[in-house]
Image: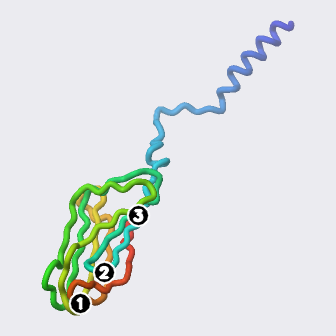
Amino acid sequence: MMKKIFTLLVVEILVLSGLGTVATSEKPDIKSVAFQPELIVEARGGFGVHVTITNLGNMSIEILGNITVTIRATLMLRGGYSILHIPIPIPINSAVSVGTGLVLGIGHCTVNVTIDIDDDGVIDGESSNTGLIFLPLVLVGKFTIPLS
């Protein structure tokens, strides 16, 4: 009698303990859940236009696509258009700043910034701001480029 109870108890533990688990053939995509880059892209004026990309995520990334800065002014003498297409590594919790270099112009201006992060030909973020340009000085307030 004791042997039957013990056998039933062992079978019950082995069989019923597995009822709460579900077997699936799909493996979860852990990388897409655990490693989410969080980028903040800002542009500001000064001597030219500077674009700062800050990585607040938990993994290093590399910008592979284009960063395009277009300055349209009443009178542009030099450097109204700039494309940067080099790989830009950005470590965790750091920022990288790129600039247009020397620009010369006079009058009201509009600064437009576009960014393609992964070089797939799709614009990941775009924004513009207006201000003034006086020779090499671009007087445009800091603005954020929202990423999609």
116 lies left or right of 60: left
Q: Quadrant of the C terminus?
A: bottom left
Q: For numbered disc 3, what is the local secondary structure? A: strand
Q: Which mark is residue 53?
A: none
Tag 2 near tag 3, CB within 8 Å: no
Residue at image mark 3: 54
Q: Quadrant of residue 118?
A: bottom left
Badge 1 is on which residue?
A: 134
- The amino acid type, in three-letter code, at marker 1 is Phe
The residue sitting at the left extreme is 77
Colour mapping used in the image? rainbow
Left or right, residue 10 beside residue 84? right
Residue in view at x 37 percent, y 72 percent: 42
The kind of residue on which mark 2 rests is Gly
Q: Which mark is residue 46?
A: 2
Nearer the camera: disc 1 or disc 3 = 1
Q: Position of residue 12 (x, y in %)?
A: 74, 20
Residue 112 location (% of width, % of height): 27, 77
Which image quadrant: the N terminus? top right
Q: Quadrant of residue 2?
A: top right
Work out whether residue 47 or residue 57 is closer to the camera in this orientation and state it: 47
